[in-house]
């Protein structure tokens, strides 16, 4: 072996030793397991929340922690380990649903004819309530979820968004109106979840009739 070959071999061996040393450092050893644990924890939490959401969508209005655990394919203690209580699982499901609800509420151009704006606003409200109905019924059936401050706060946020949406949609008609806030309060009641639920599930009206009734009552506010 000549001098040049010996030099190249030494350089390669030195590079391999540095690489091996780097792999053996405490920082390199700790990074991968910690990242793996975080990923596993997040995946488990997601699976548990997905399980609750699926059970509710399937018509189970009072899923138990044991049912959620079975659907998520985890031990019952795992549900409580990650969430502490079923109330927190409901809160997570609602938090994840908020962006989906927001996408159902779109800006309506105030320059459109009043009748068109009312029809579109009612249609959006009905779409929101249809989407949320299974979850709302499940929350009402669960004492823990029903009394949750976080869930109540989420309901207030939705009420605020819907009220602001109505105010913006009917701004031409409401501008300078002597009973502006009274009109908005009545529109909120006429297009509320409770009104939709009564027409849809108590009176068992078709979706088209529900929207027609709500549209007519809102239009009367502007006669």
Image (cartoon, rainbow, N blue to C red):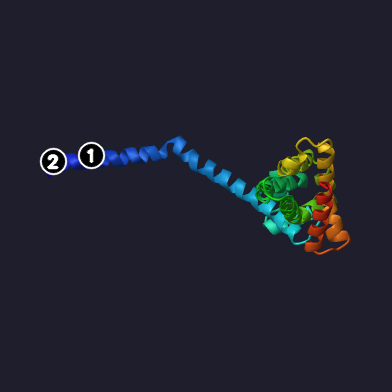
Give neighbour class at mark 2: few <14, some 14-19, many 20+ (Cα, 10 Å): few
Q: Work out whether residue 99 or residue 150 is closer to the camera in this orientation and state it.
A: 99
Is 19 on the left or on the right of 176, as rendered?
Answer: left
In the picture as drawn, the residue positioned furthest to the right comes out as 203
Place residue 50 in its image quadrant: bottom right
Q: Tag 2's secondary structure? A: helix
**Which residue: 85% across, 44% down?**
186
Is residue 202 visible in the rendered structure shown here? Answer: yes
**Which residue: 79% across, 38% down?**
149
Give neighbour class at mark 1: few <14, some 14-19, many 20+ (Cα, 10 Å): few
Q: Is residue 19 above or below residue 135?
A: above
Q: Work out whether residue 196 or residue 72 is closer to the camera in this orientation and state it.
A: 196
Residue 193, given in percent of the width and then of the height, sits at 81, 51
**Which residue: 53% across, 43% down?**
35
**Residue 50 image label:** none
First of labels 2, 1 by sequence position: 2
Which residue was labeled with disc 2?
A: 4
Is residue 142 visible in the rendered structure shown here? Answer: no
In the picture as drawn, the residue positioned furthest to the left comes out as 2
**Residue 11 image label:** 1
Q: In which quarter of the image is the N terminus?
A: top left
Place residue 9 in its image quadrant: top left
Q: In this view, does 211 lie above or below 83?
A: below
Is 80 on the left or on the right of 216, as rendered?
Answer: left
Q: Tag 1's secondary structure? A: helix
Per the model, the C-alpha gap separating discs 2 and 1 is 11 Å
Q: Are marks 2 and 1 in contact (CB under 8 Å)?
A: no
Residue 182, given in percent of the width and then of the height, sits at 85, 39
């Amino acid at each position: 072996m000549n001098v040049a070959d010996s030099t190249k071999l030494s350089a390669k061996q030195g590079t391999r030793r540095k690489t091996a040393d780097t792999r053996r450092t405490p920082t390199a050893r700790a990074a991968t397991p910690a990242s793996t644990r975080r990923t596993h924890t997040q995946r488990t939490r997601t699976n548990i929340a997905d399980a609750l959401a699926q059970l509710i969508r399937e018509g189970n209005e009072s899923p138990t922690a044991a049912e959620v655990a079975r659907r998520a394919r985890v031990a019952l203690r795992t549900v409580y380990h990650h969430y502490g209580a079923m109330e927190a699982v409901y809160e997570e499901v609602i938090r994840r649903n908020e962006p989906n609800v927001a996408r159902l509420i779109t800006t309506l151009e105030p320059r459109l004819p009043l009748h068109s704006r009312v029809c579109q606003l009612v249609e959006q409200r009905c779409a929101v309530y249809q989407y949320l109905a299974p979850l709302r019924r499940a929350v009402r059936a669960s004492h823990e979820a029903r009394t949750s401050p976080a869930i109540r706060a989420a309901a207030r946020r939705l009420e605020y968004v819907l009220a602001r949406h109505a105010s913006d949609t009917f701004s031409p008609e409401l501008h300078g109106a002597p009973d502006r806030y009274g009109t908005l309060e009545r529109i909120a009641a006429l297009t509320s979840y409770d009104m939709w639920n009564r027409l849809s599930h108590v009176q068992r009206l078709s979706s088209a009739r529900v929207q027609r009734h709500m549209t007519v009552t809102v239009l009367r506010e502007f006669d």
